[in-house]
Image (spheres, rainbow, N blue to C red):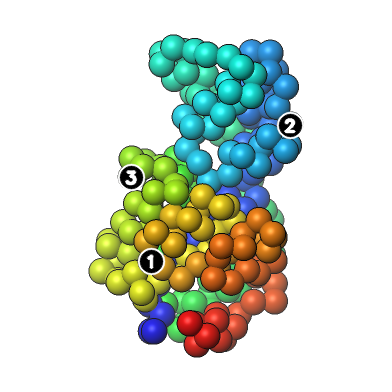
Amino acid sequence: MELRLAIFDLDGVIVDTAKYHYLAWKRLGEKIGIEFTEQDNERLKGVSRMRSLDILLEIGKQTRTDEEKEQLAAEKNAWYVEYITQMDSSEILPGVLPFLEELRTQGIKIALGSASKNAKTILERVSLSDCFDVIVDGNLVTKAKPDPEVFTLSASLLGIEAEQTVVFEDAQAGIEAALRAKMLTIGVGEQDTLHEAHYVIPGFEEFSVADLKKVLALR
């Protein structure tokens, strides 16, 4: 297989914005009387904002009208945006920038495939916008992971086939989406959590394009 495209999730792969999501959801939970823990936050990885709100309400055994849910989600997002606007390039995860630069020098296209509607804001804050050939985020897709739309659209916009694409993901829902898209999947994080991926790495500090090509050769 000739590798032509690498697609990256954002939260937990490029930068660690999960902590800001957690702070914002916890703040919302406190406002409406729901205790929200870091363990609960794991359930929100890779899923859409509205589904995340549904999970929070399920935890608290609460219900809301659609209009109320829209207001709560908007409030959570305003707090999250408040947090992420303080970010800078120091928050790029270790090894990510050299890996992106190595992909670029080898002529491999780079895409972002994220459920976040704030992806462009985050990339601008950490000075990474110019590293991506295409950015597909929650403003462009209607179906959340594990639906493969975010990945299939990324490849389609660049005219690249699924079998020529690798996806880097840190969430189970993202791994499932990439597998459904019939793309090579590299989990970024813990083997126990991401065991369905074709290959798992702890991060990018000791992972190069040469290592990636070795993984491809094993398929």
Q: Along the horizontal axis of the image, is 175 left or right of 20?
A: left
Q: Is 67 located above or below residue 184 in the figure?
A: above
Q: Is residue 36 or residue 195 the one in the foreground?
A: 195
Q: Nearer the viewer, mark 1 or mark 2?
A: 1
Q: Earlier in the sequence, mark 3 or mark 2?
A: 2
| Towards the viewer: 59 or 44 | 59
Asked which secondary structure carries label 1, the reply is: loop
Q: Which mark is residue 66?
A: none
Name the residue carrying label 1: 182
Q: Quadrant of the N terminus?
A: bottom left
The residue sitting at 41% across, 68% down in the picture is 183
Q: Is residue 34 above or below residue 166?
A: above
Mark 1 belongs to which amino acid? Lys
- Whole-percent x, y for residue 7 in the image: 45, 64
Q: Secondary structure at mark 2?
A: loop
Q: Nearer the viewer, mark 1 or mark 3?
A: 1
Residue with the mark numbered 2: 37
Q: In x, y percent, where is residue 161?
A: 30, 72
Identify which residue, 192 or 40, lies in the foreground. Answer: 192
Tag 3 residue: 140
For disc 1, the neighbor class at 10 Å (few under 14, some 14 to 19, many from 20) is some
Task: Find out whether the residues at labels 1 and 3 contact each other: C-beta distance under 8 Å.
Answer: no
User: Which label's residue is closer to the chain start, 1 or 2?
Assistant: 2
What is the CA distance from the residue labelled 1 to the residue labelled 3?
21 Å
